[in-house]
Image (cartoon, rainbow, N blue to C red):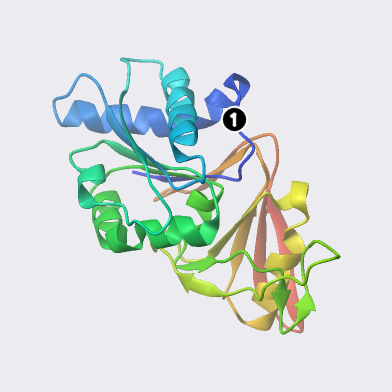
């Protein structure tokens, strides 16, 4: 099964097709388990978690072309870790956005279980911060490296240093999101050039990167930006739809 990463911004009914490949994989796994309806865990650690979990669940339901999805919604709270029960006996796992440090901290106690489930064939969907934490090394929210500004920040407020924390480890390069829309490519380039991360993929909004044994696939409105170290700097290229 695959890891599906969406760069944010895909929040309307028109965006439901971006979620369709994930839903189709969850339905396929449910069929192999003898279930007519796929069970999908939808987890939000957003400050408005209940509303955001419900909204993501609605998009997944709209994306379904077969039997209706059985949604298991979990609205987490800052400082309270997600429990293993939220992942129990499901055919797909969807993690929404929010403050990336809070999303990572809330799910960190179940990182091992997430890896086990995905290795066993359960597809993972990460949206915005949920995509960022799928990496082996998760980018934080900082906008500076060594005190130097590397991405847009409020001119009246000094930004935080970019820090790398352990992620779930479903992909082996860093993941950046909201790339074209928020000017985040410069941050990913700086992170790779400084050696904070060994390489990265940046995903535009309303764009999905699907990582599977067959390689990388891009769906949606924008591009995925690949940033790799090169002699004397970095190499930047795009993976288009």
Please tell me which residue lies in front, 4 or 9: 9
Q: Could you tell me residue 101's position as x and y percent?
A: 51, 62
Q: Could you tell me residue 191's position as x and y percent?
A: 66, 74
Q: Could you tell me residue 179's position as x and y percent?
A: 71, 52
Q: Could you tell me residue 15's position as x and y percent?
A: 59, 26
In the displayed structure, would residue 56 be above or below residue 179?
above
**Residue drawn at point x = 22 percent, y = 29 percent:** 30
Please tell me which residue lies in front, 95 or 196: 95
Q: Dot 1: few (<14), some (14–19), or many (≥20) neighbours within 10 Å?
A: some
Please tell me which residue lies in front, 74 or 113: 74
Relative placement, left or right, of 79 versus 240 is left
Image quadrant in which the N terminus is located: top left
In the image as oriented, which residue stretches furthest toward the left?
34
In the image as oriented, which residue stretches furthest toward the right?
155
Secondary structure, mark 1, is: loop
In the displayed structure, would residue 12 be above or below residue 83?
above
Q: Is residue 59 among what the camera can see?
A: yes
Please tell me which residue lies in front, 237 or 15: 15
Q: Quadrant of residue 223?
A: top right
| Number of marks in picture | 1
Image quadrant in which the C terminus is located: top right
In the displayed structure, would residue 70 be above or below residue 208?
above
Residue behind mark 1: 11
Relative placement, left or right, of 183 versus 71 is right
Q: Quadrant of residue 192?
A: bottom right
Relative placement, left or right, of 130 versus 157 is left
Q: Is residue 134 among what the camera can see?
A: no
In the displayed structure, would residue 226 be above or below residue 194?
above
**Residue drawn at point x = 68 percent, y = 49 percent:** 178
**Residue drawn at point x = 61 percent, y = 24 percent:** 12
**Residue drawn at point x = 26 percent, y = 36 percent:** 91
């Amino acid at each position: 099964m695959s890891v599906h990463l969406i760069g944010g911004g895909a929040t309307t009914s028109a965006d439901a097709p971006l979620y369709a490949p994930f839903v189709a994989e969850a339905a396929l796994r449910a069929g192999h388990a003898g279930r007519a309806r796929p069970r999908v865990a939808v987890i939000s650690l957003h400050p408005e978690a209940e509303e955001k979990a419900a909204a993501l669940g609605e998009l997944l339901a709209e994306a379904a072309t077969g039997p209706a999805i059985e949604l298991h919604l979990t609205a987490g709270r800052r400082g309270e870790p997600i429990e293993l029960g939220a992942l129990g006996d499901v055919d797909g796992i969807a993690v929404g956005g929010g403050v990336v440090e809070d999303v990572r901290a809330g799910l960190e106690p179940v990182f091992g279980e997430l890896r086990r489930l995905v290795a066993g064939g359960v597809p993972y969907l990460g949206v915005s911060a949920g995509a960022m934490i799928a990496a082996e090394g998760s980018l934080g929210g900082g906008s500076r490296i060594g005190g130097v500004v590397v991405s847009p920040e409020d001119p009246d407020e000094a930004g935080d240093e970019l820090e790398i924390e352990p992620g779930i480890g479903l992909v082996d390069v860093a993941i950046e999101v909201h790339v074209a829309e928020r000017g985040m490519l410069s941050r990913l380039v700086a992170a790779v050039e400084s050696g904070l991360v060994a390489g990265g993929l940046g995903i535009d909004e309303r764009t999905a990167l699907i990582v599977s044994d067959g390689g990388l696939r891009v769906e949606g409105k924008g591009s995925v930006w690949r940033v790799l170290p090169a002699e004397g700097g970095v190499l930047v290229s795009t993976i288009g739809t």
